[in-house]
Image (cartoon, rainbow, N blue to C red):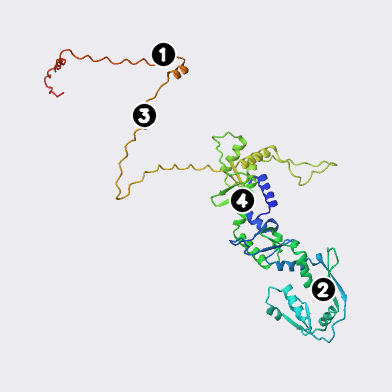
């Protein structure tokens, strides 16, 4: 992922210039140099929580290792003088006549004659310290016999000295006879503070290039090449870093993602009151597709004619190549352009091309949902009759005269309904049933006029 300090500088440049930059091009630029990005290693775990592959950190130089033994050997090889000091004392040289010695063809270290009593120890020690990943038989095949007198003489001189190792930073002086004892002492005293197992660790890209572990170095190279082909992971984390700093994103032609200080926002000149300078900039950019800032300034604020200055005798000569001051007209145009870019009304791309935000297309209305048609073999169900209102809603509403009187100021007696008058009691006839009333006479129908047909009522 991109380095945080570098992201701060990029975000500041985007805000100051107001330009829109392609996100994936920025990701490629970050991958181009190791000091611009960081690497994060995380240990994968099994379902029971145990790490699939442990990871170890050497605190002396921030190197990562997949094996604790490799980390210990690295610390003793690279930082031996930090913990131990070799001390040589003269001893008797080996007896006998030696005409050849064995020498490692890969490291150049002289092991001594094959018939020497310490030859096998020297052979196995060199294999463990330098070539532990190589099979022992393969390593033995790389040992050659050298009959050079100078090489034999050098081995005899080395055997005429005894080397002991003094432990440093210890409360008491302690001498160790050989490297095996030195490694044991390092594991007992310094291992816990120098070599630490970690679950996740972040290093700089420069430190990643200097990793000594072969497998980790191969992994770093593989991941870097994958991101160089298509930097999806770097671009994703970069977008999150930019978003946390208040920058916005948009796509050009629905394909290329850009990062800018604002997203495109259409400016309707007919509906929005703007200054005359802003209106001229928008109209110029609309009329001149793919115009640049320089063309805009030259059109809206042309430079005045330069009057040649004649040098005065004895006076100072005019400075050659002195920068011309910005005119008020140019400053006004650039100020309006800066405002338009920060509002998203005008987009200035990284290549200098200006473009106005397009009017958004109207959204199509959603069609009304059609009722589902009955499937074959399924009869249409008749509409259910309207349900009667519940009994609670059909109950008689009782009006309280007192509440109406309080609200309207009318006396309760005026509001109260009149007492119901009971119906008059029916009086039975004195003599049997009442006489029936005679039927009403039927209305007379005038006779039809001549030429008119009588119609039934």
Q: Is residue 254 above or below residue 359?
A: below
State which tag comes first along the sequence, 1 or 2. Answer: 2
Residue 386, quarter of picture: top left
Asked whether 11 or 411 is in front, the reply is 411
Q: Residues within 10 Å of mark 1 (few under 14, many from 20)?
A: few
Task: Name the residue: 86% across, 66% down.
Answer: 173
Q: Residues within 10 Å of mark 3 (few under 14, many from 20)?
A: few
**For mark 2, what is the residue?**
177
Q: CA distance from mark 4 to mark 3?
A: 64 Å
Task: Name the residue: 86% across, 81% down.
Answer: 93
Asked whether 151 or 292 is in front, the reply is 151
Foreground: disc 3 or disc 2: 3
Q: CA distance from mark 4 to mark 2?
A: 58 Å
**For mark 3, what is the residue?**
394
State which tag comes first along the sequence, 4 or 3. Answer: 4
State which tag comes first along the sequence, 4 or 1. Answer: 4
Task: Name the residue: 77% across, 77% down.
Answer: 109
**Residue 414, numbered label:** 1
């Amino acid at each position: 992922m991109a380095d945080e300090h570098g992201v701060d500088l990029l975000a500041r440049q985007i805000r100051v210039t107001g330009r829109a930059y392609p996100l994936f091009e920025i990701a490629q630029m970050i991958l181009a140099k190791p000091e611009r990005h960081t690497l994060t290693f995380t240990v994968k775990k099994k379902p029971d929580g145990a790490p699939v592959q442990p990871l170890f950190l050497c605190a002396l130089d921030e190197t990562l290792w997949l094996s604790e033994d490799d980390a210990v050997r690295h610390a003793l090889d690279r930082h031996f003088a930090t913990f131990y000091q070799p001390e040589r004392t003269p001893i008797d040289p080996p007896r006998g006549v030696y005409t050849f010695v064995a020498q490692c063809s890969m490291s150049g270290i002289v092991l001594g004659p094959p018939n020497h009593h310490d030859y096998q120890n020297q052979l196995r020690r060199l294999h463990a310290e330098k070539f532990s990943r190589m099979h022992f038989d393969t390593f033995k095949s790389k040992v050659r016999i050298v009959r050079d007198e100078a090489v034999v003489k050098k081995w005899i001189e080395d055997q005429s000295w005894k080397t002991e190792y003094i432990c440093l930073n210890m409360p008491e002086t302690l001498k160790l006879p050989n490297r095996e004892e030195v490694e044991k002492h390092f594991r007992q005293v310094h291992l816990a503070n120098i070599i630490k197992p970690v679950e996740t660790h972040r290093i700089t890209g420069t430190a990643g290039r200097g990793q000594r572990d072969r497998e980790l170095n191969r992994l770093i190279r593989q991941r870097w090449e994958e991101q160089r082909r298509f930097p999806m992971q770097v671009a994703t984390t970069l977008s999150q870093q930019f978003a946390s700093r208040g920058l916005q994103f948009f796509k050009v032609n629905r394909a290329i993602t850009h990062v800018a200080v604002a997203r495109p926002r259409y400016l309707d000149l007919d509906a929005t009151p703007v200054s005359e300078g802003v209106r001229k900039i928008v109209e110029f950019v609309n009329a001149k597709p793919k115009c640049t800032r320089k063309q805009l300034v030259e059109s809206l604020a042309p430079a005045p004619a330069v009057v040649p200055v004649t040098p005065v005798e004895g006076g100072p000569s005019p400075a050659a190549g002195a920068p011309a001051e910005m005119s008020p007209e140019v400053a006004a145009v650039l100020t309006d352009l800066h405002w338009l870019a920060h509002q998203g009304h005008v987009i200035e791309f990284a290549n200098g091309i200006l473009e106005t935000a397009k009017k958004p297309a109207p959204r199509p209305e959603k069609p009304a949902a059609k009722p589902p048609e009955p499937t074959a073999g399924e009869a249409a169900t008749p509409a259910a009759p309207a349900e009667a209102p519940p009994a609670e809603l059909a109950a008689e509403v009782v009006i309280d005269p007192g509440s109406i009187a309080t609200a309207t100021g009318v006396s309760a007696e005026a509001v109260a309904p009149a007492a119901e008058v009971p119906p008059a009691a029916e009086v039975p006839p004195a003599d049997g049933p009442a006489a029936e009333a005679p039927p009403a006479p039927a209305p007379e129908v005038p006779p039809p006029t001549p030429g008119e047909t009588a119609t039934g009522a």
